[in-house]
Amino acid sequence: MEDKSFTESLELLRKAASDISNQATTLEEALKLYENGMKEAEFCRGILDKAQQTITVYTEENADA
């Protein structure tokens, strides 16, 4: 994936979801949008997982202080 922010990736995911629900979208287009959306979701999940790990570390460090 190219360099992009969580917000940019989330916006692409939202757009894919919106485009899939458009009745003018063909099945082939919908499948490609779904595939791209899943990649964006995985990217976002990775960022969120990393953020959660960081928060856990900080929380544990502060609990010991």
Image (tube, rainbow, N blue to C red):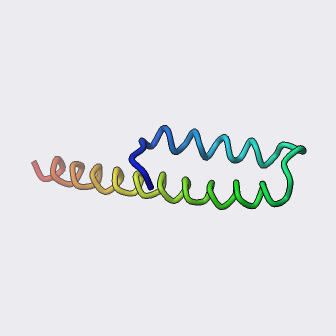
What residue is shown at x 59% (from left), y 43% (from top)?
12
In-front residue for pair 24/14? 24
In-front residue for pair 55/27? 27
Q: On the rendered structure, is 52 left or right of 32?
A: left
Q: On the rendered structure, is 25 left or right of 32?
A: right
Q: On the rendered structure, is 42 left or right of 16?
A: left
What residue is shown at x 45% (from left), y 56% (from top)?
1
What residue is shown at x 34% (from left), y 55% (from top)?
50
Residue 21 placement (x, y as % from top left) = 81, 46
Q: On the rendered structure, is 39 left or right of 16?
A: left
In-front residue for pair 32/64? 32
Residue 27: image quadrant is bottom right
Q: Is residue 13 above or below residue 57?
A: above
Residue 40 placement (x, y as % from top left) = 55, 53
Q: Report the residue that reaches farthest toward the right.
A: 23
Residue 19 placement (x, y as % from top left) = 76, 43
What residue is shown at x 18% (from left), y 50% (from top)?
63
Numbered marks: total: 0
